[in-house]
Image (spheres, helix red, strand yellow):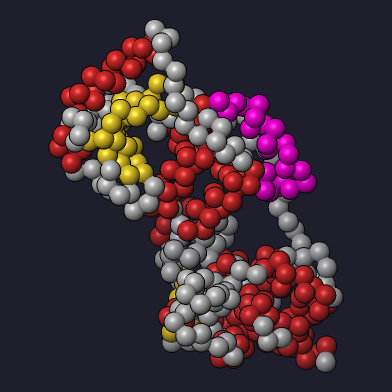
Amino acid sequence: MPNLTDRTIKAATVPARGSVTLWDSSLTGFGLRVGQGGTKTFIVLIASGRRQKIGRYPTISLQDARAAAKTLLAEKQLGRLRPIRLAYADAEADFLTECAAKNKPKTVKDYTRLLRTHFPFARKSIGDITPRDMVKRLNAIVGKPSEKHHAFVAAKVFFTWCVKQQLIDRSPMEQIAPPPLPRPRERVLSTAELTRVYQTARAGTTPFHRIVTLITLTGQRRSEIASLKWSWIKDAHIHFPTDTTKNKQPHTLPLVDTATAVLATCPQVDDSPYVFPAARKRNERTTVFNGWSKAKAAFDVECGVRDWTLHDIRRTVATGLAALGVTQAVTEKILNHTSGDAQSPLARVYNRYQYRPEISTALHSWEQYLNGLADDET
């Protein structure tokens, strides 16, 4: 945290959205708030979650602002100052703005949804939120252990940020134990279920049907397939970039004939880079497919399989590859896993072999198996 000087104030970076606060290292609680329009306002933190504006720079000089801040802090100590409240919603907006500058869009979207859905404190002062308030909000998330855990993490990250920004002295999440993680799913589709899912997906013509087909053929995550861009498909391969994969590692996967045929049926929407763009109105920004719940419910009725998720297909593919004699190392390369279960720590460092021929052979064998299931059903 640097000392505020005229030079640092003039050189302060203007945020694209929201505002940022530069705190003075020589006077605790004194800082400069820089808005997206370039306005620079001196402030003083006079209570947890409560700031007092002093005035704008350079109308008020740094020297005069620091002197005013000292006076306000002294009045606070004497009990003469009634502090201005900083609302939870304002702190949340600043937090999300900072997240947008350094996190993936999906992370920002998740934080936004979790914080606004489960912790709607709105105009309540950030400094007045107690650990009991947070426990009550978390306890209200019933029957959704995964959602509860994600909400806990989002709140903990947010309030830790508030402490670092000197908005509050202590986080209300500090002494709250994390909720237990949900048990990992172990669901693997039976041969009959896999046959119905794959056959239904192959016969359908909607984007969801095509996505399910590609997930079943490749074992990739639904988010990775749904985010496919035409520019990633080159030389009969899909080249997933690092900002799309979960482990932030580039991933190249050969396309089997059936996958190529499915992609050939996908219409290329004007001005959209995506293979599966979301429906949008005129002048709206193009996004990727997002109608999961409704499409999945309709697909369940169509195929007749119940109590399954798209991620269960990924587990089913891994299990099926093992049954076909594919080694664990090759399966992990196909799934783009970094767990390293198939290699020792030393091998993971020095063995840089990519198993490209083995991956191609394994996926073609899996394609033949799937198409054989569909043929047998008919």
- 301 shown above or below 370: above
Q: Which residues are magenta?
A: 128-150
Does the magenta run of residues contain 280?
Answer: no
Q: Residue at x 73, y 48 (%)?
A: 144
Residue furthest front as drawn: 59
Q: Residue at x 75, y 58 (%)?
A: 186
Identify the image quadrant of residue 118. top right
Could you say where residue 245 lies in the image, as x and y percent from the top left? 50, 64
Q: Nearer the viewer, residue 116 or 305?
A: 116
Figure quadrant of residue 361: bottom right
Magenta residues, dominant SS class: helix
Residue 287 can be seen, yes or no: yes
Image quadrant where one finds the N terminus: top left
Residue 78 to residue 331: above or below: above
In percent of width and height, residue 177 lies at: 64, 31
Position in image of residue 188 (x %, y %): 76, 66
**Residue 358 visible within the image:** no
Q: Quadrant of residue 212?
A: bottom right
The residue positioned 83% from the left and 75% from the top of the image is: 301
